[in-house]
Amino acid sequence: MEGSSQTPMHFPRYITIAMDIGERMVRGEFREGQKISGRSTLAGLYNVSPETVRRALTLLQEAGMVKVVPGAGVFVHSVDAAREYLAESGQYKVIKEMQERLSNLVVQRNKLNADIEHLTTELLDYVLSVLSTKHRI
């Protein structure tokens, strides 16, 4: 039956960038207090616009993972906040995947119901035609 494979999740690019930076923090590639590359460098690294990087950094700052200091740059603020952010993101992914799977199953069920209804109608029509021919109904 179609739909048994899971479809990949698609997050906006700025969220995937924020998650990647958070993962790098948790892995120790970025330490607390360390300066992270500027917007232009990150934009080049991720092959996105500086606006996309700005949105990712805003998300990271709101989560308490980084501090954006105007004129100085972006600094790692809390690795623990990165762990929490990634855990919450993971929960969101699970929920979103379950919603998508449920939606796919509902579509499959509706198709099966339509097929069953169609076949039932065909069967009844056939039975009536056989009976009417045999018994001249």
Image (cartoon, grey):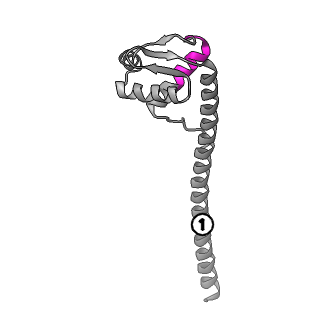
**Residue 31 drawn in magenta:** no
Amino acid at pointer 1: Leu
Identify which residue is drawn at 57% across, 11% down.
31
Q: Name the residue beneath numbered marker 1.
A: 119
Q: Position of residue 92 (x, y in %)?
A: 60, 37
Is the C terminus in the top left, top right, bottom left or bottom right quadrant? bottom right
Q: Position of residue 81 (x, y in %)?
A: 61, 24
Q: What stretch is highlighted in magenta?
A: 19-30
Counting labels gives: 1
Mark 1 neighbour density, 10 Å: few (under 14) some (14–19) many (20 or more): few
Q: Which of 56 and 2 is in front in this view?
A: 56
SS of the residue at dot 1?
A: helix
Q: Nearer the viewer, residue 127 or 1?
A: 1
Q: Position of residue 41 (x, y in %)?
A: 38, 14
Principal SS element in the magenta part?
Answer: helix
Can the viewer see residue 2 in this picture?
A: no
Q: Position of residue 49 (x, y in %)?
A: 34, 25
Q: Which of 112 and 31 is in front in this view?
A: 31
Say left or right for 46 vs 120: left
The residue furthest bottom is: 137
Identify which residue is drawn at 49% across, 15% down.
75
Can the viewer see residue 8 in this picture?
A: yes
Identify which residue is drawn at 61% across, 50% down.
105
Identify which residue is drawn at 59% across, 41% down.
96
